[in-house]
Amino acid sequence: MRTIEFNCPIIDHESINGQTVVLTLEAPAIAQIAYPGQFVNLTSNQFLRRPIGIMNADPARGSIQLGIRIAGEGTRFLAKRKKGDILSLLGPLGRGFNLEGARRVITVGGGTGVFPLYFVQKVCQARDLEGIAVCGYRSLGDSFLTDQYKALTCQTLFASEEGDDMDFSGHAVAALDDLLAKLPLVPETRILTCGPEKMMASVAALADEYGISCQVSLEERMACGIGVCLVCACKIKRGDEQGAEYQRCCTEGPVFNAEVVEWQI
Amino acid sequence: MADLTVCVGNIPFANPVIAASGTFGFGREMRNFQNLGRIGGICSKGLTLLPRDGNPAPRVAETASGMLNSVGLQNPGFTSFLANELPFMIDLGCRIIVNIAGNDPEEYLEMCRRLDATSVDAIELNLSCPNVKEGCMLIGSNPEMIEKLVAAARQVTKKPLWAKLTPNVTSIADMARAAESGGADAVVLINTLLGIAIDRKLRRPILRNNIGGLSGPAIKPIALRMVAETYRAVSIPIVGVGGIMSGNDVLEFMIAGATAVEVGTANLIKPTACQDIIDEIRAIMELDGVSEVGQYTGTLELWNG
């Protein structure tokens, strides 16, 4: 029997700005098997658990990191937890990104989407894959994790919608477009994206234009996170026939190949 | 040693805790968390004759001490269930109850006929799904239709028939009486209560289906009241459902008149909920000095005057 519920102490709490924190939790069993794109479902002071993408897993240290942005009461409670507090986690859950056969991995994150994609670039570094990280923020003041990304071997491209002092002035999608136009294409390139649905749909369209395979990490209101309640329905095109069906964001996803996603925007 | 066995009609259960339909799938995911042979039974996800896509997302909204859902009976269809899920469920080692929801009476009967030849322990007639437009809750809100449907089902199967009732009626006891008159072996109550959650900024319901079914601890007092009322109205066993999160909750339902219970939303918060609740019941029985769990059933003494 595979037990995947754990009570995990917080071993580090880093406040990035008033709205965003990175929690480091002692979770050796999760750290051992988690891979990029997976998530944990954790208890807060609210009724339902909160699904949070895994930002980093360190099997040697037996810890994982979670980037949390305050969006409501539950995430506010989580962001206010202190070192030593214990959280109940279910995980690692879901199907994450597939890096099989990739030579170059371009990640495109928007807002909190840059958290789980950090894990992707960290794995790329460990596997000696060429990595390019495009991270989109509203503004410089709203940016986070830039130093951590810079410390990796991947090339970084930070975009600010407000056009202040970052690498690219504009939206992450425009930054990607600019990058792809200049970049000599190599075979086995993958674009992996996580962020607002509108952004991911644009990234997927751009990837399609350039003939690059693309994976997207979808988000849907969730309850159990383990595949029994069927509330986190994502509309996914059927493989064999016309039409689409609802698949579970928590189980068949959250990561899907972009071409099977029926965008809801 | 505490004796947790109960009988619902003539089927014995190892304990009174059954996983409620729609919160446990077909058991595949949950066996990663607990030994399913230890729980009293599992009630399958609600099945329709033909596969159903379900409703568009969002299908869930969190509420105070509960949640609204509008899944809309997404399921692979009855034929696929018989071929791909039922054999797996039968091997789990606990009682298996199959929850069926028809678009019309004939669909219920067709599924009852085909279940008669299987080794399921009971059939739960879902007369209460709030998230589909046809059948179901429409039948379940009308005592004549309930009685007629249960009586017709009685003709086509020897399996125990449980009628799962909706609380979205004026008198659930009347619905339970109708099910009893039709020949039901037990009544299961309550299903979810209709509700709406609103996004103030968008001035829209959060659920894409606009309305959904409320579940969780928020509905427990209503469910307890309905079980207590129904206990005085029928003589068939009652399976109590509604916001059960602990062993103590189970015993409250039994005191109100339930013979067994179904645990639903708790499974979504804590995948080991059923197993933990069974352990809690055992511990409470030791404290109470009660040797057989059935001794709690129907012991509620109302205040007089």
Image (tube, grey):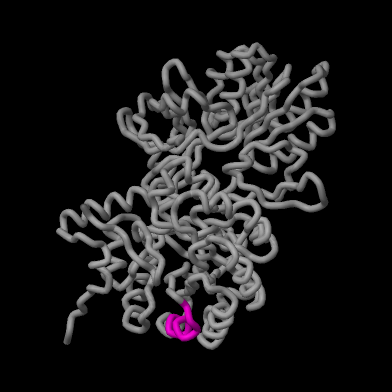
Q: Main secondary structure of the magenta part?
A: helix
**Quadrant location of the N terminus of chain A?**
top left
- Can residue B170 be spotted in the picture? no
Which of these two is toward me, A133 or B209?
B209
Locate residue B265, reporting x and y percent.
44, 56
Quarter of the image for residue B303 reads bottom left
Residue in the picture at 69% in, 43% down = A198
Q: Nearer the viewer, residue B4 or B165?
A: B4
Q: Is residue B28 left or right of residue A104?
A: left
Percent of width and height locating residue A111: 59, 34
**Residue B60, percent from left and from top:** 53, 56
Is any part of residue A56 visible from this angle?
Answer: yes
Q: Is residue B106 above or below residue A14?
A: below
Give the vertical position of B281 relative to A6 (above or below): below
Q: Is A202 colored magenta in this rendering? A: no
Q: Going 39% across and 56% down the picture, which residue do you hit?
A: B40
| Total number of numbered discs in the rendering | 0
Tell me: residue A250, above or below residue B18: above
Vertical order, B201 against A66 (above or below): below
Residues in magenta, as a range: B176-184
Please tell me in which quadrant of the rendered image residue B180 appears.
bottom left
User: Is B172 in front, or is B196?
Assistant: B172
Residue positioned 74% across, 34% down in the render: A203
Residue at 56%, 24% (x, y): give it.
Answer: A119
Residue A209, position in %: x, y? 84, 32
**In the image, residue B183 lies in the stretch drawn in magenta:** yes
